[in-house]
Image: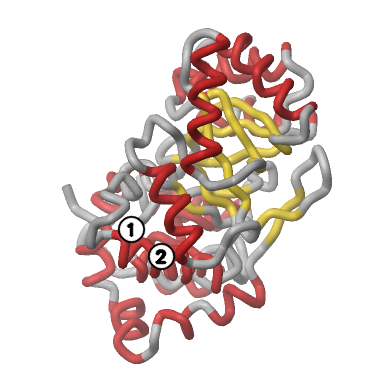
């Protein structure tokens, strides 16, 4: 598998930038101009680049890997990021997120989103209680029913927490295009959902058909997972230089083209790429700055990755 590491090593623009400037300076523009979009349920503004934790944050909370992750979090916040998405099913990711938040003195400064993936009310309540403890917080911004597991039961648990003021927003998630119709059916039935999270990218565009338009028309915030197709998208442009026309939308890497393709869809609230590498974090944040592609430019990006 051709990796993002290999792609960035072969990118003259990103490699040169990294060699001549510290990562913090790469983020100065992002900190000032990171795009924000409103959560329809409240009008609260959320930065369009978030941080996922699947796989990347599943490390020993006392191990050496925490050093890079702490730098990732600091860069993320310095660049204007707020939203971190995690889950109890991501191994140690919740505990690591809570510990990093403590080390970075970031308590109360982040938008914390997690999930519940349990069957039965009691199991759901126990799992959520553990999430509060792992994330070191008495309140959470968003809890989502993960992959539609026992959806009706867990939504009732989440509604109770929301009524108590312990959870600000509730939602549902999935990561496969084959589940989009089921997500849509739940959104149509459960009219009080604030968020829905699903996969959408240059290589997985099914959400454009019905899911994204429905969310736009009905005031539902959207979080986008799998923006890089778990790295497969980079293999499609292996050995290809970044096209000159990328400068037209202020993109300096292939990763930024992929993220800007997604963000050009107005129904997208935020995209949540995961990383444990500081320079990838800086690169991702730059996608949330500057111009976004129009319809013709989006199709040009799609052809480049086709």
111 with respect to 192 (left or right): left
Q: Which colour scheme appears in the figure?
A: secondary structure
In this view of the protein, can residue 81 be seen by the observer? yes
Asked which quadrant contains residue 91, the reply is top left
In the rendered image, which quarter contains the C terminus?
top left
Q: Residue at x 29, y 79 (%)?
A: 15
Disc 1 versus disc 2: distance between alpha carbons? 7 Å
The residue carrying mark 1 is 276
Label pair 1/2, CB-CB below 8 angstroms: yes
Label 2 environment density (alpha carbons within 10 Å; few <14, some 14–19, many ≥20): many
In this view of the protein, can residue 205 be seen by the observer? no
- Residue 203 x %, y %: 40, 40
The residue carrying mark 2 is 72
Count the labels in the image.
2
306 with respect to 142 (left or right): left
Q: Residue at x 71, y 31 (%)?
A: 215
Residue 125 numbered tag: none
N-terminal label among 1 and 2: 2
């Amino acid at each position: 598998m051709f990796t993002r590491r290999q792609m960035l090593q072969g990118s003259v623009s990103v490699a040169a930038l990294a060699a001549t400037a510290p990562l913090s300076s790469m983020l100065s523009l992002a900190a000032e101009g990171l795009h924000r979009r409103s959560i329809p349920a409240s009008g609260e503004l959320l930065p369009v680049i978030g941080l996922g934790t699947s796989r990347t944050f599943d490390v020993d909370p006392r191990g050496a890997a925490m050093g890079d992750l702490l730098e990732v979090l600091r860069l993320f916040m310095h660049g204007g990021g707020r939203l971190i998405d995690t889950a109890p099913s991501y191994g140690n990711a919740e505990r690591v997120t809570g510990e990093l938040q403590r080390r970075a003195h970031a308590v109360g400064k982040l938008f914390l989103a997690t999930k519940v993936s349990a069957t039965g009310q009691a199991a759901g309540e126990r799992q959520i209680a553990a999430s509060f403890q792992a994330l070191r917080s008495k309140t959470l911004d968003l809890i989502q029913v993960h992959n539609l597991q026992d959806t009706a039961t867990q939504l009732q648990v989440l509604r109770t927490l929301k009524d108590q003021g312990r959870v600000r927003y509730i939602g549902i998630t999935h990561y496969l295009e084959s589940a989009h119709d089921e997500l849509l059916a739940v959104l149509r039935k459960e009219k009080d959902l604030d968020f829905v999270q699903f996969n959408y990218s240059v290589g997985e565009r099914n959400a454009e058909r019905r899911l994204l338009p429905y969310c736009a028309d009905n005031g539902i915030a959207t979080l986008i997972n799998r923006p890089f197709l778990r790295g497969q998208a980079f293999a499609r442009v292996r050995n290809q230089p970044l096209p000159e026309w990328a400068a037209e939308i202020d993109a300096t890497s292939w990763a930024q083209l992929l993220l800007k393709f997604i963000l050009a869809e107005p129904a997208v609230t935020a995209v949540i790429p995961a990383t444990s590498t500081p320079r990838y974090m800086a690169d991702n944040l730059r996608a949330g700055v500057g111009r976004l592609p129009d319809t013709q430019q989006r199709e040009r990006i799609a052809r480049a990755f086709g």
